[in-house]
Amino acid sequence: MSTFLELGLKEPINKALTDLGYEKPTVIQEKAIPQIISSTDDLKAFAQTGTGKTAAFSLPILELIDETNSNVQAIILSPTRELAVQIGNNIKDFCKYLKGVKVTTVYGGSSMEDQIRSLKRGSQIVVGTPGRTVDLINRRALKLGNVQWLVLDEADEMLNMGFKDELDKVLEATPETKQTLLFSATFPREVEAIARNYMTKPVEITSGEKNQGSDNVSHEYYDVTERTRYPALKRIADLNPNIYAIIFCRTRRETQEVADNLIKDGYNADALHGDLSQAQRDSVMGKFRKKTIQILVATDVAARGLDVTELTHVINHKLPDQIENYNHRSGRTGRAGNKGISIVLVNGKEKGKLRPIERIIKKKFIETKVPSGKEICQNQLMHLIDKVQNITVNESQINEFLPSIYEKLADLDREELIKKFVSLEFNTMLAYYENAKDLNDLSKGNSRSRSVDENMTRFFINIGRKDSLNPAKLIGLINDQNIGDKIEIGAIDILDTFSFFEIDKNYENDTLEAFSSNQPDFDGRSVNVEITKKERSGGGRRGGRKPFGKKDGGFGRRRNSEGSSDSRRSNNGDRRDRRSSERSSSSGDRKSGGFGRKRRER
């Protein structure tokens, strides 16, 4: 493997890398850096999360940039504010000894005026989210006529979040002579579309096989029902006393509910999602990096800017809507040479989604049993004993207390002392798990038991998979009807010739009226929307449209078997979370409040 100096990077950059502890380039860096330095060809680069993509595109740009020219020479687009901030900070570290290079990061949720002032002072490199970048272009505060490099980082995610129009506008503002660099951890069809639309005969490089998971990560799945999903999650956490994990959920509501339940049950946990202000996000992420928080419950997009190298576990409370995103999630662990575990909780209906993921990551999921109470207590006890064995005794401070301690414990022999010591630490846990049920006993009734969410109304729509409908397109169609500013879209079921979706019941009449008055069409087909009833617990059906033999199965909340509420929604609202994660006030931080569509960041 080469050194960074051998890759063609000048001494000031190498000195900064040495300060940061960089010794050898990663595979993607070793391939991308000389390619970008030596050629003006467009580039597609694919590498797993955590393999150093930011350095792979930013270091060669720093090598070639004109420090004496204060015009914007590189524009780097990122799907979320967190990731944009992370990239901007990394580049500032890399150009520590390049005194003439200035970097500005622009994103929603922060003062636009401050960002404009920074641009006016001159910045050769601008890192931004698509919405805020377009706003600054429209205000003529950001001029891209001299751009030599356009970097699309996580470009597939930008398309998933609905930023195609913004990408088009940024492309229009940049010269045709620029070099376009596309970096991604996954290789869905959308990436090929980007290459066709935005790039000219790009060179392609990969780190390992496209989309393949990291060799340092093992993949496990646990069979659960909706009733046992949260209790199983708790048992996994209890089995691993040193757990340092991200739990991924699909929606903001599910994220907050899981985090609230964990906190209530005594875990060092917190939530990270799009309804938090920027200040709140920064606070949560700061605590997690310092390990004040052991378990972070997050949506996919909110966790994108979180760069932590020591995660022991990634836990999928629910699988992502786009199976390619599983690679993004699992790539959060197993970094920097560490081993990691990616866990998936799946019910019978969801288990079929594991096979396509296995084909992508080129690995098999290992079926793992939910631990018993006995296993958990044994693990916790041995962990405590290990801590006792390895504790450093501060002789100078404790010596003066030892005589009275010895006198107090003089009547206890060694065995009695150990028993009392263990009981002191473990009586509560032993009592909690004394009569714990076997969560691996998935009876037919339990595996199929379902309940409805009374806060949602379920709708039938007469288009489906054969019309090329997918959840993202359906959400876009719903949003186009301008039903309300803060609607929440719930469960989505895409079938062959028709589909179902859920909307906050407060917008039931507004939804019907909007689709009726707007009379939308989808690819030339007239769209019809009707209310349908949800299946009740026990399998009975109450009136309404019969969904042609398809069990539509509502999702709601039930008390779980170990005493905490569990969200039972199979919700695709996280797509809207992705689209709104960077949309906020133009000056200062505010809590966005409510769920649903929001205006793009300004």
Image (cartoon, grey):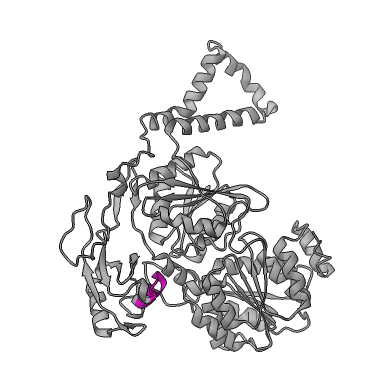
Residue 272 vs residue 55, the one in the foreground:
55
- Residue 469 lies in magenta, yes or no? yes
Q: Main secondary structure of the magenta part?
A: helix
For residue 64, what is the image quadrant? bottom right
Q: Quadrant of the N terminus?
A: bottom right
Residue 152 rendering spot, x and y as whole percentages: 60, 75
Q: Please indicate, yes or no, whether residue 298 appears anywhere in the rendered image.
A: no
Residue sitting at x 31%, y 72%: 497
Image side of residue 509 versus residue 89, left or right = left
Image side of residue 488 versus residue 368, left or right = left
Residue 144 vs residue 336, the one in the foreground:
336
- Residue 317 lies in magenta, yes or no? no
Residue 437 rendering spot, x and y as whole percentages: 35, 35
* Residue furthest to the left: 543
Residue 544 vs residue 416, the one in the foreground:
544
Residue 104 rendering spot, x and y as whole percentages: 64, 75
Q: Please indicate, yes or no, whether residue 487 appears anywhere in the rendered image.
A: yes
Tell me the magenta residue range.
468-477
Q: Is residue 549 above or below residue 521?
A: above
Image side of residue 435 versus residue 134, left or right = left
Q: Is residue 556 above or below residue 184?
A: above
For residue 36, what is the image quadrant? bottom right
Residue sitting at x 32%, y 80%: 481
Residue sitting at x 21%, y 55%: 536
Figure disc tally = 0
